Image (tube, rainbow, N blue to C red):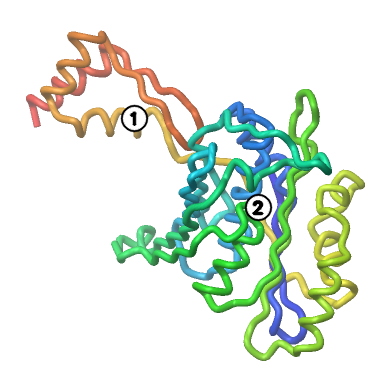
Amino acid sequence: MGRLIHGIAEEGTIRVIASDSTDIVAEAVRRHKTAPTASAALGRVLTGTLLLGASFKDFDRLTVKIESEGEIGGIVAEADANGNVRGYAKNPSAEVPAKQNGKFDVRGIVGEGMFYVIRESGFDIGLHRDPYVGSVPIVSGEIAEDFAYYLARSEQIPSAVLLGVLLNNSAPYVRAAGGVMIQMLPGADERVIKAVEAAVEKAPHLTTSLTEGATAEDLLEISMGGIEFEVLHERETAFKCNCSHERALGLVSALGEEEVRAMLEEDDGAKLDCGFCNETYELSPDDLRRMLRKGTTD
């Protein structure tokens, strides 16, 4: 489980969001067995998606999709309004040499491409509205800058975004992960904006602070440079997928009687893998026979 806080500063002209996502990223890395640099990239996208979701009021599902030409191929993360997030890298084995300073070359495995944000709402009350889709080119590949660029261009919200993932050389591989998002809303004082920019520039790496015991509030205090803020609410967050054995049954059943019969006769069952969480669901011959019997009696 992780933790996310959401607050305001300067009489509501600045929105502040922060999260310790260490457990979330650790679970994603464990499930997908990602290489180190791919782990850093995926962890940043998962954390950024959580933060971005907290800045929106009305959505059931928020998807951040990076389609890139780099070795990783792309990254997809999906969050819901309850603080759950799931995601994957298209090539979890993507790896390139570290930079000269020893840091992960996330830009190197991402490369050029497009950054998409898809916001869907209405499902919980039975509506099926057209999703909102925003997109911008990848300008950095370091992920945090790409979230900030998206907010500035598509949402017209100047923002500072900090995302970090620190790994160990052995299990547990994720030592720390977290993020901060500071959004300048209409009416924000220019002097305050410059003060925040200066504080962000001078702030130590988030993961350094987290390994020293910093909380989400501490991350905001460091990033805001002493500017006071009010926490409006907080929530627990988790890497959580909505797949299940029942959903797997439904997906196979929807293929139709002919396809189900072929699975039974040729493969003696079926196996489905969830791309988001890497869980495998095995459907037995009896599962398929029940589908066929149900199909003939409906």
Q: Earlier in the sequence, mark 1 or mark 2?
A: 2
Camera-nearest residue between 41 and 127:
41
Which residue is pictured at 39% across the width and 66% down the height? 132
Count neighbours of disc 1 (C-alpha within 10 A) and say few if under 14, some if 14 to 19, many if 20 or more: many
- Left or right, 100 with respect to 163, comes to right
Residue, disc 1: 248
Q: Nearer the viewer, mark 1 or mark 2?
A: 2
SS under mark 1:
helix
Count neighbours of disc 2 (C-alpha within 10 A) and say few if under 14, some if 14 to 19, many if 20 or more: many
Q: Amino acid at mark 1?
A: Ala
Residue, disc 2: 142
- Left or right, 196 with respect to 24, comes to right
> Residue 105 at x, y = what percent?
69, 43
- State whether residue 131 is above or below residue 172: below
Which residue is pictured at 79% across the width and 37% down the height? 175
- State whether residue 284 is above or below residue 182: above
Camera-nearest residue between 82 and 267:
267
